[in-house]
Amino acid sequence: MKNVMTCKGYTARIEFDQRDNIFIGKIIGIADNITFHGETVKELRADFEAAIEHYVADCATTGRTPLKAASGKIMLRVSPEIHARALAMAKTTGKSLNQWAEEVLGKAAHV
């Protein structure tokens, strides 16, 4: 995936600000707003790691549990036709629907 960094289970989307000539990162997938920046990739990585450390420390100080991007559980609503076809595809590969869906989603997410 392009323009993405990961650290300690957190994923950040990276953009380049041409006006200020810096990289800007924002942690995605959680409700809290955590951003960081750097003029070089090395600075960006260091600020990303520092932002996570600060976030975790702040949560500990305030008695909150740091948010994580995903629990690993997905609830989907699809049409009965798609559900039936997905179930059939899973069975033809000898997998459960959950195993098959994880594989398909992993490929789509380039994991």
Image: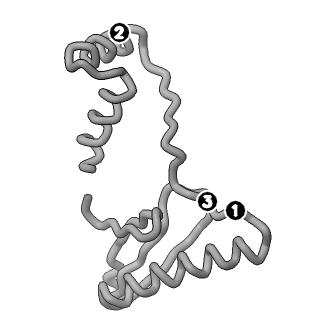
Q: Which comes before the other along the chain, label 3 or label 2? A: 3
First reached walking from the N terminus: tag 2 or tag 1: 1
Instruction: Report the front residue among 67 and 44.
Output: 67
Residue 108 x/y as whole percent: 26, 41
Question: Gap between marks 2 and 1, in whole Å?
Answer: 39 Å
Position above or below: 53 against 32:
below
Residue 111 in picture, x, y percent from top left: 27, 50
The residue where tag 1 is placed is: 65
Q: Which mark is residue 1?
A: none
Along the line of sight, the residue nearer the viewer: 71 or 77:
71
Measured from the top left, where is residue 91 in percent x and y? Answer: 27, 14
Identity of the residue drawn at 38% across and 14% down: 83
At label 2, counting other C-alpha atoms closer than 10 Å, the crowd grade (few under 14, some 14-19, many 20 or more) is few
Packing grade of label 1 (10 A; few <14, some 14-19, many >=20) is: few
Closer to us: mark 2 or mark 1?
Answer: 1
Q: Quadrant of the N terminus?
A: bottom left
Label 3 to label 2, Cα distance in Å? 35 Å
Q: Nearer the viewer, residue 52 or 33?
A: 52
Residue occupied by mark 3: 67
Q: What's the residue at 21%, 14% (across, down)?
A: 92
Q: Amino acid at mark 3?
A: Leu
Q: Is residue 18 above or below residue 79?
A: below
Q: Amino acid at mark 2?
A: Ala
Q: Residue furthest front?
A: 94
Indicate the amino acid at tag 1: Thr
What residue sits right under mark 2 in the picture? 84
CA–CA distance between discs 1 and 3?
6 Å
Q: Position of residue 50 (x, y in %)?
A: 51, 84
